[in-house]
Image (cartoon, rainbow, N blue to C red):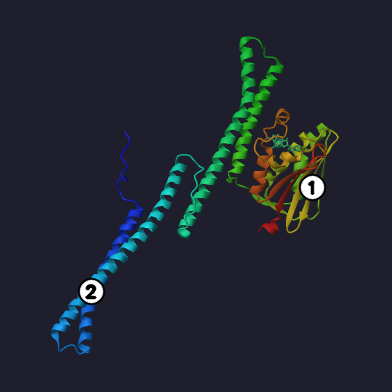
Amino acid sequence: MVAPDPRRGRSGLASRLLAAIALVVVTAGVTAWLVAGAIGPATFHSHMLQAGASHDPVAVLHAEEAFRSASALSLTVALAAAVLAALAVSLFLTRRIGRSLAALSTAAARVAGGRFDAHVTNPHLGVEFDELADAFNAMSARLHDSEALRQRLLADVAHELRTPVATLTAYLEGLEDGVESLTPATVAVLRAQASRLTLLAHDLAAVTQAESGELVLQRALVTPQEIVAAATLSAGDRFAARGVELTNSVDPDLSPLDVDRDRMGQVLGNLLDNALRHTPPGGVVTVSARSVDPGAVRIVVEDTGEGIDPQHLPHLFERFYRVDTARDRTHGGSGIGLAITKALVEAHGGTITATSAGPGHGSRFEILLLAANAAS
Ligand SMILES: Nc1ncnc2c1ncn2[C@@H]1O[C@H](COP(=O)(O)OP(=O)(O)OP(=O)(O)O)[C@@H](O)[C@H]1O
Ligand SMILES: [Mg+2]
């Protein structure tokens, strides 16, 4: 059974405001009436005496009686009209306030019910109300965006899980039915699908942590030379094995950066992995670092590989975005590397951009970071 709402039957803000204003207006009217009644006749009497009417008391009495009834009538009518006019204006204003608050509470109830598209129009009832409406609209827009993001992430994850899980299930069923046998080739397929699931779980955890803003950076002063040398050293063997040349070019005497060494290693590692994956044997990948005025350092990973069509460039840093979904997936990537890379660079206060002259013309990823002396 639904418990009765204890607020039901209680009067709203608009009627309370109206009752308070009515009380003020009636009190002012009665006070004005009493004060005018106490002062008016005495003043009139003294004026009659000054005008020399004391020799005819009957005429004075008559004139005073006429004044009293005329002023009582006009005062009563004037005050009644004033009270009614004041109440009509108050009714209009309190209804307007009531309507604005009702619109806000209806919109809040929609948001509470999970409808994040609720919007309130600006009531123009003063700065506080306007700020309240703006804050409410900003809040619902933000909730709307994060809900959309959550739904897209869930759909993406479900999509990514489907293929490896379906492959594993098919193979296991084949083994059970005796259609497949546990040969080294079958084990390799099962293992590859299992590692794809493991990688996905790892990447999802990494991107969630990086994008949550809760990433704790172990900042220290590191020179761009050290960052670039460490990244190229650890990727060197893989490049040599594929016959892709890896070179680096760093300006001497670059200002140190106040960064998390491991996270920056992860950033360059992701970019180098991508460059290697998309550059055929015989190609060249270059990592460079230059100083940019004022007090910034630009680190660039550039390749002579397959390049990227301009229409894909704005989406590259979105989670699960792959230029050629089928082919990029078979390369083994989850399509999360660049999303993690961007979140890590932004956690350092930097920016990352991708450019390419188009398919067949290589790609260029550019990171801009403030030098430690400029950042402090
Ligand atoms: N250097 C590059 N040259 C051409 N295309 C690239 C390059 N770097 C990234 N891309 C494109 O951008 C897509 C997204 O890259 P991202 O690093 O986010 O995912 P991934 O490499 O496919 O998978 P993951 O990094 O999660 O293992 C890639 O699938 C690829 O299509
Ligand atoms: Mg990648």
Judge whether 26 appears above or below 299 on screen: below
Q: Secondary structure at mark 2?
A: helix
Q: Quadrant of the C terminus?
A: bottom right
Closer to viewer: mark 1 or mark 2 = 2
* Residue at x 56%, y 39% (from the top left corner): 148
Q: Position of residue 326 (x, y in %)?
A: 71, 28
* The residue positioned farthest toward the right in the image shown: 282
Q: Position of residue 375 (x, y in %)?
A: 67, 57
Disc 1: residue Cβ within 8 A of ligand 1's nearest atom: no
* The residue positioned farthest toward the left in the image shown: 58
Q: Nearer the viewer, residue 248 or 33?
A: 33
Q: Which residue is mark 2?
A: 70
* The residue positioned farthest toward the top in the image shown: 178
Q: Position of residue 237 (x, y in %)?
A: 79, 35
Q: Disc 1 residue type? A: Ser
Q: Disc 2 residue type? A: Ala
Q: Which residue is mark 1?
A: 288
Q: Dot 1 surroundings within 10 Å: few (below 14), some, or many (20 or more)?
A: some
Q: Secondary structure at mark 1?
A: strand
Judge whether 302 appears above or below 278 on screen: below
Q: Position of residue 335 (x, y in %)?
A: 68, 35
